[in-house]
Amino acid sequence: MKKNREVICGAAALLAAASFFVGCLQIPIISKKISSLGNINILVYGMSLILFCAFCIIGLVVVRRMKPSSHSILESVWVKGGMLVLLLVGQAVFFIVGVSQETQQVGSVAGRYGWHTQPLWLMAALFFVELAAFFWMYRKITVEEKCGEWLLYVLYAVLTILVFYSMDTPNIFGRGEWGDSYHAHAYFNSIYNVHWGMPYTAELTSIYGHYALLWKLPMKLIGGDFRMFVLLMAALGAISHLCAFLTIHQVIKSRVFRGVAAIACAFPILGMRGGYYWQLWPHRMIFPAIMMLYAVTVLRKKKFGWKTALSGYLICMLGVIWNTETGMILAAAWAAVHICYLFSEGACNWKRIGKYEIFHLAGVAGSFAGAYGLVNLYNILKYSPVNTLKEFMVPLMSDAYMTDVLHLDLPMYPSAYMAEVTLFLIGVFLGIAGWRWFREKGTEVPWKKYLLFFVCISALGRLVYYMNRPAYHNLDCCHFSAVLLLAYLCEQGLWMIRKGNWKQWRTYSFERIVKSSIGVVCGAALIAMATGTVLQFSQNSEIKENFHNQEELDQFLQIVEQQVPANTFAFGLNVTEVYSMLHWNTQCFTMDFSDMFVAQDSAKQLVEQMQQGVEQVFTSSASLPILEQFHPEGYQWFMETYTLDKSLSIQGTEFQFYVRK
């Protein structure tokens, strides 16, 4: 009976948070007021999360105080049947409508996916047939406990190799699409600057963090070569996937769902992305994957103590250097799971709670302070001023970046982010429900629920990246976390189906009906992603084929080397990439041109350098409109001072060589 009430408590908290979320965004008077305070998406999202947690705690306190009852309306056949239909049919409708709207999102390339090139009714029917066949086989077929275990490791190895090859795309001009070279330059430019010894300043920074410091030694070993850098990025992508596979392997018992979940993990890289976006894969994935594997190892071996906690904060410190927001979110989630553990295990008193919280707050602060100190130590060694907090946290403290430049409205039709948020809130509820004040006496909290609590807190924090700019692929930032939770809930729900009999569903408890229904829904989502990986792999590989064409790239580099003097003063989009492959120095270091709006003074400093008597300039044609936008006077001076001598192009990307008149 208590379990039924907990289910209702969690559902009520979800409905309250969802109603608040939609109301704040859709009611004009409220949305206008919130928008005046900052980024409405992030503010409403944050308030909704707080409201959910408050409802959970209050609801669980009420449930705890309620007297047990021998009869409950929840055990009525009509109520149980209605809940079964609501969850299964409701989610089927949600998925179908969501898929039909998939192509409308900003940045979506879903129109080329197989399920959009055929009639929706046909694809939906085929998918339901696939689900029915899968669940029937899962129920009927039993495999010996250790049989075929080695096949899973073969699958992990194959997927890791495929991810590595898919991400090793040195020819960024391969597709001839502007977005590829634009994103590549945005990410690589600061690495090139640091490789040549430049400090971090307001005009020489990166909106993606101080990851270039961690790249400095590897780049020195490979000579700063862009192609070798891409190879190492592919290795990081493969490692992040391998961490996810190993985490799933330790959490999920079923070999079937281990395999399905592993294939689903590879969906974004092997099935969806025709281009690449290093800012997300692997940039925002590598440290969450490492921390996820570290957490499961610590929890599984019951090594949860201050030493492992400090080691976790050390990893988070490196994460803050790598990407400020991701590292801080991981540190906060690491502290949260330790506090959750304290609230769940052993006796608690205010003194112990206070000491515990102070220790972990210090750990979070230490992660940030350590990263801030190391970045400024590097600056001092380069005889550069110390960064202010605002400079260190670029662009998080920039109002224009958070509310104007990249802001998009959240889709209000059935969308994947709604399912993900719901999924992670379920994980948070499972963690809170395990606190010693709310659970039944004599019961223990499985270590897996602590892991899920950490994963879900981390994922909800990292979803701010999507909330700030709800573009299609940005939801990938929590993909591994979503797959892990789907696999766990699926295994828990389908275990009941496998051991029970659906014909006797009337005899099952309300809680069991809900868990089993959620298991079916999560299993369907997991199978959908795994199927998408398999169906789209061939098409996706074909799209990426020319990214691997180094012969074309070598020919272009040879032409540049022959027609442009070595180490010619150079600036602009993709110039650093070309120069790094030639091992040349641009003699000019600026903010990346893709994100020049963050540090517009960098454009002025660029022109000032050229005014010191630079005779020859190498740039890209796409860079001059950006210079004109952020420094019109400088652009006019450039066009009056220099004349175009020659143009060189590769796959539609034009580079230009100018000489002083």
Image (cartoon, grey):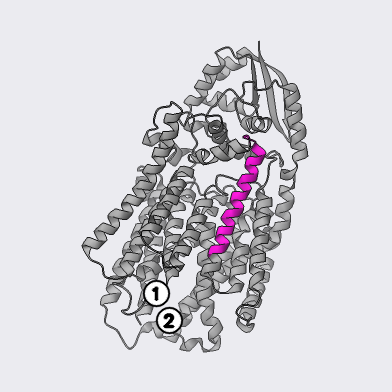
Q: Quadrant of residue 584?
A: top right
Q: Is residue 376 visible?
A: yes
Whether the magenta-drawn stretch holds residue 236 is answered as yes
Specify the quadrant that holds the C terminus: top right
Q: What mark, if any, has residue 7 been given in the picture?
A: 1
Mark 2 closeness class: few <14, some 14–19, many ≥20 residues within 10 Å: many
Where is 348 relative to 590, above or below? Answer: below
Tell whether 254 sits left or right of 452: right
Where is 194 relative to 334, above or below? Answer: above
Q: Which residues are magenta?
A: 223-247
Kindly check if marks 2 and 1 are in contact, taking CB atoms under 8 A apart as contact.
Answer: yes
Q: Which residue is mark 2?
A: 510
Mark 1 closeness class: few <14, some 14–19, many ≥20 residues within 10 Å: some
Residue 215 x/y as whole percent: 55, 40
Tell whether 67 sits left or right of 73: left
Residue 401 x/y as whole percent: 45, 38
Callout 1: helix, strand or loop?
helix
Of residues 54 and 119, which is closer to you in this image? 54
